[in-house]
Amino acid sequence: MPHADSNGIAICYQVYGEDSAPPVLLVEGFGTQLIGWRPQLIARFVSAGLRIVALDNRDTGLSDRLGPSDSADPGYTIADMAGDILAVADALRLEHFHIAGQSMGGLIAQSVLAQAPERVRSATFFYTSPAITPEYIHESSQEALTVQDVSDRDAAIEAAVARERFSASPGYPFDAVWARELAGKAFDRAPEPAGGARQVGAMLGFGEGVQEQLRSLHTPASIFHGTDDFYIRPGAAIALHGLLRNSELHVFPGMGHELPEPLWDDFAAGLRRAVRRGEEASTAR
């Protein structure tokens, strides 16, 4: 797979769809590899006329590790991780692009938008937050973010399935087969643990300065959240909607901290609508 150079850190990415289609960079969440975006969902996005670029965040998957998984050193910020996204865009020679992020990836997407608003034509956010505070984050999520020893393949799979079950949507069937399949593929693709402690540190420092920058923007955006997200409260999505004056908010009953298959058409339509609005706004300037 190709890699982009982000100030000496190699960031792995994969491209789907036609080069002529509007490019959308997909940013994953905490410790999750780019293969966490289900192939069938990516196919929906491509069928909607989009060029999809999925990537492994630093310390994850086939991107560079910066140290042991349980060490907070060397530390970095969400802004640094946003720089990785811009490095991928530069590697692909994308002067302008659209971005979509889920969970921690939504924090990164906000930071990209704040750092380079002139390059981002639209943004789509799945279950994320404008700040990491008790107002928005469930206390129960702390245990799920604990760095675990996953050197044994079977133990790693069981731990990953347990996290997926915690994230699942009460209003929709839990796909245990996919969760187990993904966990096995993730371990085989990159058995070295992700830099969990450093990513947690980056998230805890997020928010300062970004909110005020977002308030001044008119970038088209779509925001998706579930009423039954046990990591991030729905109020976080409402607050983000309040910051982004040109955003659409979609809150789904029974949805947790995941992208349930019965809602894929809604997600694809919302993403495509944000992209269309962004493209139309760019031609109107």
Image (cartoon, rainbow, N blue to C red):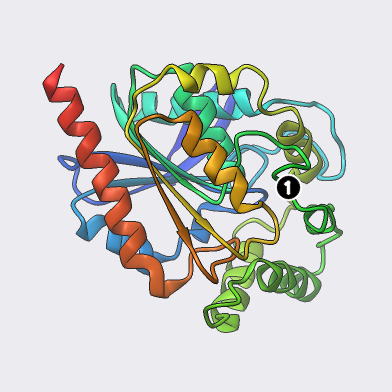
Q: Is residue 77 left or right of residue 9?
A: right
Q: Residue 274 placed where, x, y %?
A: 29, 42
Q: Is residue 48 above or below residue 25?
A: below
Q: Residues within 10 Å of mark 1 (few under 14, many from 20)?
A: many
Residue occupying image coordinates x 51% and y 52%: 34
Q: Quadrant of residue 178?
A: bottom right
Residue occupying image coordinates x 50% and y 59%: 35
Which of the two residues, 73 or 192, is positioned nearer the viewer here? 73
Q: Residue 158 placed where, x, y %?
A: 76, 75
Which of the two residues, 219 or 59, is positioned nearer the viewer here? 219
Asked if residue 46 can be seen in this view, the reply is yes
Q: Is residue 209 above or below residue 62?
A: above
Residue occupying image coordinates x 57% and y 70%: 182
Q: Residue 93 placed where, x, y %?
A: 30, 25
Q: SS for tag 1?
A: loop
Q: Quadrant of residue 174?
A: bottom right
Q: Is residue 5 left or right of residue 49?
A: right
Identify residue for label 1. Answer: 137
Amino acid under disc 1: Ile
Q: Quadrant of residue 152?
A: bottom right
Q: Is residue 134 left or right of residue 224?
A: right
Q: Residue 255 placed where, x, y %?
A: 54, 67
Q: Is residue 210 left or right of residue 46?
A: right
Residue occupying image coordinates x 34% and y 21%: 119
